[in-house]
Image: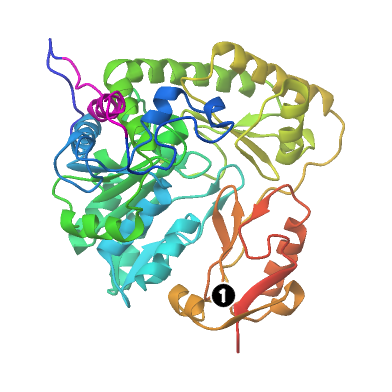
Amino acid sequence: MTRRVPLPGTRPAPARFAQALRRYARRPATPLHTPGHKGRRFLPGLSRWLTEEGLACDLPAMDETGNWLATRGPLAAAQRDFAAECGSAQTWFLANGSSSGVHAMLLASVGPGDAVLLSRHSHLSAFAALVLSGAAPVYLPARWSAAAGPVPPDGDEVARALEADPRIRAVLLTSPSYYGIGRPLAAVARACRRRGVPLLVDEAHGAHLPFLPPAPDLLGSALAAGADLVVQSPHKTLGSLVGTACLHRTRGGLVAPERVQAALALVTSTSPSYLLLASLDLCRRWLATRGRAELARAVARARRLREAIRALEPLRPLGPGAAGLPADVRFDPLRLVVDVSGTGLSGHDAERHLLASANLLDEFADEANVVCVLGPADPPAVLARLLRAFDALRRGARGRGRPPAPPSCWPLPPQALTPRAACSRPSEAVPLAEARGRIVAEPVCQYPPGIPWLVPGERVGRELVERLREARRQPCHFTTADASLRTLRVVRE
C-alpha cells in the first residue's frame, strides 16, 4: 500500500459532507422532520454546548446530505476522500466507536462454529463480537512485560498457531496495545494470506500512525502492512469528536466489501450523529492540509520529553531497549508510558500526584506505570509542566521503601463454553467467593484499558477471585452487572 501524495499544484478535497450540512441548515424551509429540537435551542442549557449553527447541522439522513450506507451523496464522497487520504480501498465512518467496527469485522469474516485466533488481552469488543458471531476463540500464547503489559505476537507465532488449528477462519490482533507497543505486522499478514485467512486489526489507538514521519523505532500502520480490515478511532489522537471511528478495507483483501457493508448494517444505528461523522470529514481535511506537519512536531516534542524524563532517575520511560521486550517491538511515539516503581510509588500514586501538584489528568495507571496520550493539541508549556511534575515526584519519593510489585499475567481461566453459549444460558448472580469453579456468564472487564479479566464461558479460579478482591480497592471501574464486584453472574447449573 502506498501513501496518498497530492500532485503538485493540486488542492485537497474540501470537507464536502460538513459543507452539505451547513448548506442544508441555511435553507429557509421550516423542518417538519426529526430531530425534535428542529435545529433550534429547544432544550434549556443545550446552547451552552452547541452553537446555533451546530444545532441546525444536527440532522438525520437527508437526500441533500446523504445516507450513511449510500454509495452516492456528500457523506459517501467524504468516506471516499478519507479512504484516499489513508490509502485504503474503502472506508466507512462510524459514530458508535471502534467497538462497532470490531463487531462488524468479525461478523463479516466468521460464523457460528468457526474459530478466531486472537490474544486473550484483546479489547472487550472482540469478545462481544464472539458472542454476536457465534465463533469460538483460539488464544495466542500469553506473554507479559512488566514495562509494557501484554506483548503482541510476531509472524512466526501466528503462523504456528494457524498450522496447528485448521478451524481458524480469521486472525484478530490489537496494534498498538494500550501501552503503545506493537510488532511488525507485514509478516503476520503474509502468514495469514498463505492460509487464506483474513487478518483483522483493532488499531483503535493508532489512527495517527499512517500519517507520522518514518523512524526505525516507530510502529507502522496496519493498512501499510497489508491487513484485510482495520478499525481506528480518530477521536483518540486526531481530534474528531468522541465516539467517531473508521473501518478500512485494504486493496485485494480477503473479505468482500458487501459482507462488511451487511455486517455494519446489523450493528450500526440507522440514525448516526451527523455532527460526529462531519467531524471525521473535518479531521480528514486537517490531515490533508497541515495535519502531517503538526503531527511531526508533536512527535518531536514527545521524543524530547521522553529523553528528559529518562534523565530523571529512577523514572523509566518506555522505549527501545526496555527490559523484557523482544528486539522487534516498535512504539507509538505519542504514547508516554513512565515506570515509577523505582521511586517506591505505584502508578496510581503517580496519577494522584500529577493531578494534585500539576492539575494534569493521565490516561491510565497500573501498579508500576502511568500512561499519558500526547498529540498536536498539547502545547510545549503543558509538556514542560508534566516534566516538572515528574521531577517533583521522584525527588519527593526518595526513601519511601520498596517499589510495588509490577503488574503480571496469570494463567488463562479454562474455557468450558463458547462465549455465545455462556451468554445464552440461564444465569444467576452469586457472591464473589461462591463463584469459584463456576462458569462466568458475563465479561468481567476493567476499564480502562477494557481488557477482560474473565470472558463468558470461562471457569472462575481461586487466584482470580483473590485478584478481583484486591482490585475492588483500586481506583478502577469494572463493567460488570455489579460494578462493586461483590457478585458475579454465572451460568446456572
Q: Position of residue 456 (x, y in %)?
A: 53, 72
User: On screen, 238 above or below 366?
Assistant: above
User: On screen, 241 above or below 111?
Assistant: above
Q: On the image, numbered disc 1 is attached to which residue? A: 441
Q: Is residue 458 magenta?
A: no
- Name of the residue lying farthest toward the bottom: 493
User: On screen, 284 above or below 94?
Assistant: above
- Residue 297, picture quadrant: top left
Q: Nearer the viewer, residue 117 or 317?
A: 117
Instruction: State which region is magenta.
Output: 11-30
* Colour approach in the figure: rainbow
User: On screen, 246 above or below 372?
Assistant: below
- Residue 323, picture quadrant: top right
Q: Is residue 12 magenta?
A: yes
Q: Residue sitting at 28 percent across and 25 percent down?
A: 28
Instruction: Kindly tell me whether residue 182 is visible in this rendering.
Output: no
Q: Residue sitting at 33 percent across and 64 percent down?
A: 160
Q: Position of residue 63 (x, y in %)?
A: 19, 40
Q: Nearer the viewer, residue 247 or 375?
A: 247
Q: Nearer the viewer, residue 126 or 414?
A: 126
> Quadrant of the image for the N terminus?
top left
Residue 259 horizontal side relative to residue 485, left or right: left
Q: Position of residue 387 (x, y in %)?
A: 66, 18
> Which type of secondary structure does the marked residue at label 1 adopt?
loop
> Quadrant of the image for the C terminus?
bottom right
Q: Nearer the viewer, residue 377 or 22?
A: 22
Badge 1 amino acid = Ala
Q: Position of residue 492 (x, y in %)?
A: 60, 86
